[in-house]
Every structure is written in C-alpha cells, then in structure tokens.
Amino acid sequence: MSAPGQQVAQAPPVASPEALAVAQFLRNQDLKSRTCILQGQRKDLFKVKRAVRALQSDNYTKASTKNTLLPKVTNPNEALQAFSLLPRNLLALRVSKIEPGSDGHPAGKPGKRVKGLWTVKIEQHQEMRDELYYTWFYEPRSWTQTLMAIGVILVLLLVVMFPLWPPMLRLGVWYLSMGMLGLIGLFIAMSIFRLILFVITMFVTPPGLWLYPNLFEDVGFFDSFRPLWAWHKVGKEKKVKKSVAGEIQSDAVAEKSATSNTTASPAPGSPPKAAAPPKPTVEEG
C-alpha cells in the first residue's frame, strides 16, 4: 500500500479492440496526410472531414463485413462516434499550429522550425469538426519493420558466433576487412594530397586548384569524382565586380557634372551671350 499523499504511477490506458480496428482501417486509407513536428518528433497530420468521409465510404462497408470489431456506420453521426474512439483511446489527438509569439515562444525569437512543416501542439479540448486537424499516435507495425528486426537479430547472432565459423569463411572476412581498411586509408591519403596540392597552387597559381572538387559535396558516389579538377571558387568576385562598376559609374557621373558646370558658367570678363530668340510656332508664322 502507498503512503498517504504519495502519487501512484498509472499505466497508460490500453486501447480497445474496436478503436484499434478503426485506427488500422483509417491508417490504410488516403487521408491526404501531411507531416508535422510535435515535441520534436515527426507525426502524420490529417483533417477530421477526410477521416469521417472514409468511415462512410464503400471500403469501410466492405471492411466492416469482414471485421466484426469495426462499428456500424450508416450516417454522419455514427461516423463521428466511430471516429471519437481514436481520441478516447489516445490513438489520435487534436492539434493546432503553433504561431510565433504564442505558447511560450517569443515573437522575436521563434523556436527552431523545419521548412515546409507545421509545428503543432496538442489541444486540451478534443473537439471533432470538419476543419480541425488530428495527428496520429497509432503506429502500426509493418512487414518491413518485422523483417528488419529479424535481420538485425540474425546479424548479431552471426557476429557472436564468429569463432565457430569455418576457417575459409573467417579468412574471407579477414581479407574483406583488410580491403575495406585499405579503401579508407586510400581515401584519407587522397584527401590529404588534394589539400597539399591546393595550398601549393594557391600561392603559385591563385586562386588554387582542387583535385576532385565535389569529393565532399552532397552528391552521388560517382558524381563525387567528377570533374577531375577545378579552380577554387572565389565568393567575393561578384562583390568586387559590383564595386568596380559602381566606382566607374560614379566617376562618369562626376565627370559629366563637372563638364556641365564648366559649360554653364561663363569665364570672368567675357561678355554675356545674347539669348537666342524663340523659334516661331505655326500660329506665329
């Protein structure tokens, strides 16, 4: 027995078979889900109206005839009742988008945001309206996950039982490991050589020469070794060109203004020029 006033840890509620059946059906339907960020984790987001529409579709009618755990749905109210099994069993909860400056995030310093993804929070009131959004907490186990788990276990068993392998297999693994170490060493040596080559060419023939310039870029394996060499890209070339063009333009403007000033102001002591008579117009002629 627990002491008075001591909090007792409660186990999370176990979802009912009916709720699991509804969640599994909706998970296999096209709800036009999108990805969101909830407490730093990626979740699937969907609208209530698409889930209710799926519960009233012919696919649900066919699935309910095969699976007796699925509740009967004949009208929109029954569809909403079937959908309400999800939040009541914590399989899907209503969320809302977090705007900058709300929920403890200062307006000037918003939290880290992933481009193209909503950052959402769980709402306290779990309402069910067509325009509201829900996010999934039910993650069904797929065949690929099961096969990957079995494969990891088999690999671990093979590694643990390595002393029991036949001598030929152990010799083959030794040669394979030596080959991999040789490739890694060759890659490190090539990286050091290209750095030394760049430093030398940077002083001899600036701006410097890179061997395999895409070696550390985010490209494919074969694209990392194409092209064979390239000159070092200088990021300030555009700024230098713009500044030179600006100086040339300012010099031209200064020269133009100087020439206009010299032509406008007459020399001292010279008689003023007579103003030219205006040209006659058609009416005056």
Image: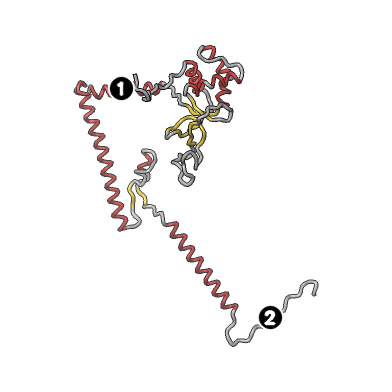
Question: Does residue 28 show up?
Answer: no
Classify mark 2: helix, strand or loop: loop
Q: Residue furthest front?
A: 4
Is the C terminus in the top left, top right, bottom left or bottom right quadrant? bottom right
Which residue occupies 30% across, 58% down? 203
Q: Quadrant of residue 148?
A: top left
Question: Does residue 171 show up?
Answer: yes
Residue annotated with mark 2:
275
Q: Could you say which disc has been placed on residue 52 in the image?
A: none
Q: Position of residue 24 (x, y in %)?
A: 48, 20
Q: Position of residue 273 (x, y in %)?
A: 65, 83
Which residue occupies 76% across, 75% down? 280
Is the N terminus in the top left, top right, bottom left or bottom right quadrant? top left
Task: Give the CA distance from mark 1 to mark 2.
Answer: 104 Å
Q: Could you say which disc has been placed on residue 153 in the image?
A: 1
Q: Position of residue 119 (x, y in %)?
A: 48, 36
Which residue occupies 45% across, 45% down? 109
- In the figure, is residue 77 to the left or right of 34? right
Looking at the image, residue 127 lies above or below residue 258: above
